[in-house]
């Protein structure tokens, strides 16, 4: 499926217009920068979800599952390269280029995809790991739209 066909781009544009509210990069960077000095800051780095992800030492992938082996010991399996190890993986921070206020619904979906999210009790904020292209072209947006089955030819295809 070509998630970036002309029709699918229009569907994703409509989706982004519904779910993404405003760029707040400057505000979030300012608050995070001051949060270590100001206990009344609306949020801090401690409130950022998915900022550090477990990273496979073999391939660098971040799709790592904690599973039990046949001896019922906890092991870590990289779903990208199938490496299995008993050693707990290191964590690496994700690159964040932009911060966007989004709907709570989209925040839940992005969180499921291990995207960086802050919820300050009033707003859900997405730490976008790409920049320089329209949000509708982000791979995670395509994946969410595909999961919703709203793209061209899918069961819940949106009219545009």
Image: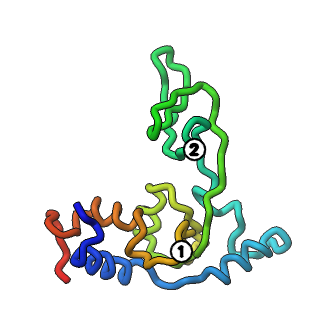
Residue beneath disc 2: 60
Residue 84, position as x, y percentages in the image: 52, 27
The structure's colour scheme is rainbow
* Quadrant in the picture for residue 48: bottom right
Q: Is residue 130 left or right of residue 145?
A: right
* In the image, farthest residue toward the right: 37
Secondary element under disc 1, as helix, strand or loop, is loop
- Alpha-carbon span between mark 1 and mark 2: 22 Å
The answer to whether 97 is drawn above or below residue 18 in the figure is: above
Q: Is residue 102 left or right of residue 160?
A: right
Query: Where's the C terminus, which quadrant?
Result: bottom left
Query: Which labelled disc corresponds to residue 131?
Result: 1
* Quadrant in the picture for residue 29: bottom right
Nearest to N terminus: mark 1 or mark 2: 2
Q: Are marks 1 and 2 in contact (CB under 8 Å)?
A: no
Towards the viewer: 151 or 24: 151
Residue 17, position as x, y percentages in the image: 37, 83
Towards the viewer: 5 or 146: 5
Residue located 47% across and 36% down the image: 81
Mark 2 closeness class: few <14, some 14–19, many ≥20 residues within 10 Å: few
Secondary element under disc 2, as helix, strand or loop, is loop
Residue 66, position as x, y percentages in the image: 52, 34
Residue 122, position as x, y percentages in the image: 56, 77
């Amino acid at each position: 499926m070509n998630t970036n066909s002309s029709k699918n781009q229009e569907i994703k544009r409509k989706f982004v217009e519904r779910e993404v509210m405003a760029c707040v990069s400057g505000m979030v960077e300012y608050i995070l920068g001051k949060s270590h000095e100001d206990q009344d800051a609306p949020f801090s780095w401690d409130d950022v979800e998915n900022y550090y992800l477990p990273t496979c030492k073999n391939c660098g992938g971040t799709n790592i599952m904690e599973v039990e082996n046949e001896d019922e010991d906890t092991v870590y399996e990289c779903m990208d390269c199938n490496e299995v190890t008993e050693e707990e993986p290191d964590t690496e921070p994700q690159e964040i280029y932009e911060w966007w206020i989004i709907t709570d619904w989209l925040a839940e979906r992005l969180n499921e995809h291990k995207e960086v999210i802050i919820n300050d009790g009033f707003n859900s904020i997405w730490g976008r790991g790409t920049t320089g292209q329209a949000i509708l072209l982000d791979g995670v947006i395509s994946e969410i739209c595909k999961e919703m089955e709203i793209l061209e030819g899918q069961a819940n295809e949106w009219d545009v």
